[in-house]
Image (tube, rainbow, N blue to C red):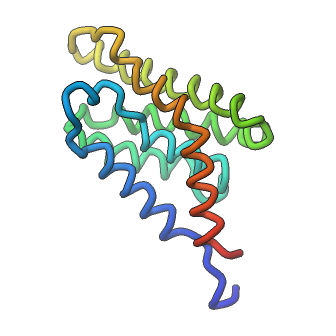
């Protein structure tokens, strides 16, 4: 490997840290329920684009960091992220060639699955059920996916040279 070749490990790490930081930023009360699932979107993006670099192990570590950052039950996001990464890795060759609207719908279904798993874990832990606003982040993420994907593709192409 040439010394000038950049493989993007630092970019992947920095993007996960940025997504985690944006997840814990305080938002106004009216906007808080609509916060997009940036960490999950970042995980899906990297599993689609560089499946040999980001996988189930990485997603589990990111999930643990998400649990710690949000003060959630330790392991709930790790389990959900590992499942989402596994599904994305299994389908990445198909999803990469989807038109952006179909890709957004696929991401939406993955996000809903993740939210359902987290809701199930919260129910087992004895947390009361939540209202319909619980599903709003998945809808917001669906609407933001085309711009998120375009932005991340531009960033990846600018910083990663192979």
For the point 28% across and 11% down, the residue is 130
Q: How many numbered marks, from 0 up?
A: 0
- Where is 36 relative to 11, above or below? above
Q: Would residue 131 be found to the left or right of residue 89 on screen? A: left
In this rendering, would 100 be left or right of 8? right
- Residue extending farthest bottom: 3
Determine the residue positioned at 40% across, 50% down.
61
Q: Give the quarter of the image for residue 99.
A: top right
Residue 60, position in %: x, y?
44, 45
Instruction: Please state the horizontal and vertical placement of residue 80, each as a whole percent of the image.
Output: 45, 31
> Which quarter of the image is occupied by the N terminus?
bottom right
Q: Nearer the viewer, residue 75 or 160?
A: 160
Residue 134 appears at what percent x and percent y?
Answer: 34, 17
Q: Give the quadrant of the C terminus.
A: bottom right
Quarter residue 63 falls in: top left
Q: Nearer the viewer, residue 86 or 129?
A: 129
Query: Would you say 124 lies left or right of 116 here?
Result: left
Q: Is residue 149 above or below residue 117?
A: below
Please report the residue visible at 64 percent of the width from the left and 25 percent of the height from the top: 105
Q: Where is residue 10 shown, x and y percent of the image?
A: 48, 70
Residue shown at 61% from the left, 70% from the top: 158
């Amino acid at each position: 490997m040439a010394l000038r070749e950049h493989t993007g490990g630092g970019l992947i790490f920095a993007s996960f840290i940025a997504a985690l930081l944006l997840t814990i930023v305080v938002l106004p009360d009216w906007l808080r329920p609509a916060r997009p699932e940036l960490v999950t979107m970042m995980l899906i993006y990297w599993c689609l684009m560089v499946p040999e670099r980001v996988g189930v192990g990485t997603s589990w570590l990111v999930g643990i960091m998400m649990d710690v950052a949000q003060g959630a039950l330790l392991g709930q996001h790790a389990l959900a992220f590992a499942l989402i990464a596994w599904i994305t890795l299994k389908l990445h060759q198909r999803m990469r060639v989807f038109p952006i609207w179909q890709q957004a719908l696929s991401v939406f279904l993955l996000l809903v699955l993740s939210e359902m798993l987290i809701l199930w874990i919260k129910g087992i832990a004895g947390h009361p059920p939540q209202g319909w606003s619980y599903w709003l982040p998945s809808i917001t993420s669906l609407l933001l996916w085309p711009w998120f994907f375009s932005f991340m593709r531009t960033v990846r192409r600018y910083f990663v040279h192979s």
